[in-house]
Image (cartoon, rainbow, N blue to C red):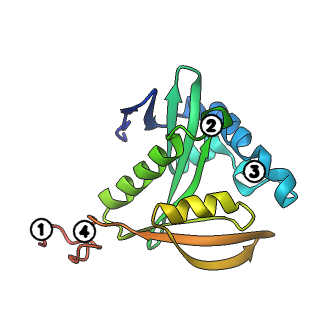
């Protein structure tokens, strides 16, 4: 059984999503991405995901306040690292540090697992997200069209990870 990972932050707490959270996660993601539908001409990819399945198969975390789920983080393990697949914040809580706390959690999780970088992608028309990621130290690595979406790929080197610090992720190496 996986550790629940609960952390308290100003007015909300972060914890691992549970199967019972799937409907609330879906609601939060849809609310967060609704404003982009008109901009990109169709629902963004995260609006199409099955969150019951995502919670079963990937590392999904939620930010929870009195009103329920106010933020979502989806991490996907890839063959060579970790992908920040989705970070979504309910519009009523945007600008209050929820997204940054979720991104910081993603970076800690990747570092804890020995990854030297954390990768993510976003739609090219979600320019405010691209700027936020750049301010947080992410660098653009590629642009490509996948499944009809113009995606911008970014990555961040994670200081403090075993690999980034030069031991190749081997236990006991210093």
Tag nearer the camera, 4 or 1? 4
The residue sitting at 50% across, 62% down in the picture is: 135
Residue topped by disc 2: 25
**Residue 146: quarter of image:** bottom right
Q: Is residue 76 above or below residue 22?
A: below
**Residue 163: quarter of image:** bottom left
- Mark 4–mark 1 Cα distance, whole angstroms, equals 10 Å
**Residue 142: quarter of image:** bottom right
Density class for disc 4 (Cα within 10 Å; few <14, some 14-19, many ≥20) is many
Residue topped by disc 1: 172
Q: Earlier in the sequence, mark 4 or mark 1?
A: 4
In contact (CB < 8 Å): disc 4 and disc 2: no
Residue 162: image tag: 4
The residue sitting at 51% across, 40% down in the picture is: 98
In contact (CB < 8 Å): disc 2 and disc 1: no
Q: Position of residue 127 (x, y in %)?
A: 69, 62
**SS of the residue at dot 3?**
helix
111 on left or right of 67: left
């Amino acid at each position: 059984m996986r550790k629940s990972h609960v952390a308290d932050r100003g007015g909300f707490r972060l914890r691992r999503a549970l199967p019972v959270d799937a409907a609330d996660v879906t609601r939060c993601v849809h609310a967060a991405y609704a404003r982009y539908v008109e901009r990109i001409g169709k629902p963004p990819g995260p609006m199409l995901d099955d969150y019951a399945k995502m919670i079963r198969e990937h590392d999904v975390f939620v930010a929870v306040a009195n009103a329920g789920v106010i933020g979502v983080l989806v991490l996907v393990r890839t063959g060579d690292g970790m992908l920040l697949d989705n970070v979504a914040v309910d519009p009523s809580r945007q600008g209050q540090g929820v997204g940054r706390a979720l991104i910081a959690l993603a970076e800690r999780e990747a570092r804890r697992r020995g990854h030297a970088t954390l990768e993510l992608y976003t739609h090219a028309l979600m320019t405010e997200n691209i700027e936020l990621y750049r301010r947080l130290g992410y660098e653009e690595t590629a642009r490509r069209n996948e499944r009809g979406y113009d995606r911008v790929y970014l990555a961040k080197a994670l200081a403090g990870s075993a690999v980034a610090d030069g031991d190749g992720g081997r236990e006991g190496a210093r």
